[in-house]
Image (cartoon, helix red, strand yellow):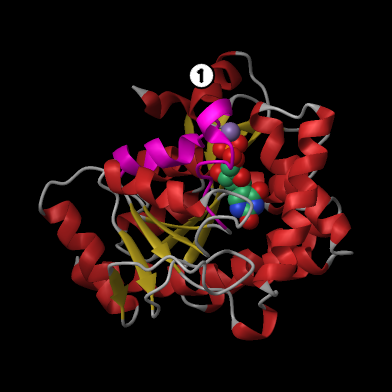
Amino acid sequence: MYEKYLDIAPHVKEAIANNQPVVALESTILSHGFPYPENMDFAKEVERIVRSEGAIPATTAVIGGRLKVGLSEDELMFICNPKDVGKVSRRDIATYVATGKDGATTVASTMMLAHMAGIKVFATGGIGGVHRGAETTMDISADLMELANTPVAVVCAGAKQLLDLGLTLEYLETQGVPVIGYQTGDFPAFYSRSSGFKLDYACRDAAEAALIVKTKWDLGLKGGVVIGNPIPKEYELDHDWMEGIITEAIKDANAKGIRGKATTPFLLARIKDLTEGVSFGSNVQLAYNNARVAAKIAAELCKLG
Ligand code: PSU
Ligand code: MN
């Protein structure tokens, strides 16, 4: 039924049909995570990196109410401008489709579109999670419930340090979502390689990650897998320095009464300003690194059939 709302780019459709590796990419990181117009270079470069690793990139979005999997360059550039596009998570999709609106997809909605198209691997920066203070605000990203339900492997640099990472891991455990460290035994903290939270599982390489993902689905277990891939050492930011910046950004958000889906974009932009752009540079690099690893895992999954 959903097929009538879905546009899969022909080259993406062909790759899926031929069991070639495809990597889904989200668009909220473009329009609401990164500043415009710098995000336009990122959007093109991350797709180039996926291609250079032998996989087909498929950025997702909602354009004119159509669910898009795989964007043309014009569409990709259009979706970068936050003035033109909303932030679309699971709860927003039906409204955007029914009313013909334009929106960028979050981790949750990108997983949905990837699954509709038959894509198994998705690369992002960091997943959404349980926000600090969630015990009173109840601000828990829809990304976590999506991971519990939708069968897509998400390669990320953990969850953003601005979240409550301990509670995020607890939530994922409750929901039965495997969290696998990519060549690490620690849950990555986005800007830094380790959050200090130990993971129960580390995988050696892309082949082992693919095997775990495939086995989960062979067993009939629903939902996704989180693959935590730490930021490359040379781009890592000091964890304690970032803690100070994040505390200040959260204080600003509270003072301004920022709520709901505006929270994550506000905090990312504030952190970028407070670090004079340094956090943006690291965010870009960790996302490139995730795209690279996701392409490798997608290739290994294809080999497993
Ligand atoms: N990762 C980034 N930058 C981002 C996001 C992730 O490096 O902007 C986005 C993702 O789209 C994620 C969303 O799904 O933030 C989480 O938003 P919320 O907390 O409102 O669910
Ligand atoms: Mn939220």
Mark 1 neighbour class, 10 Å CA radius: few under 14, some 14 to 19, many 20 or more: few
Looking at the picture, how far across and down is residue 76, in whole percent? 70, 49
- Magenta residues span 126-151
Q: At x 38% / y 36%, what residue is drawn?
A: 145
Q: Is residue 203 left or right of residue 166?
A: left
User: Is residue 150 highlighted in magenta?
Assistant: yes
Q: At x 18% / y 52%, what residue is drawn?
A: 217
User: Is residue 95 highlighted in magenta?
Assistant: no
Position of residue 197 relative to residue 122, above or below, is below
Q: Give residue 47's quadrant in the image.
A: bottom right
Q: At x 37% / y 52%, what residue is drawn?
A: 119
SS under mark 1: helix
Judge whether residue 28 can be spotted in this image.
Answer: yes
Q: Give residue 197's quadrant in the image.
A: bottom left
Q: In terms of depth relative to the viewer, which is nearer, 144 or 138?
A: 138
**Disc 1 target residue:** 94
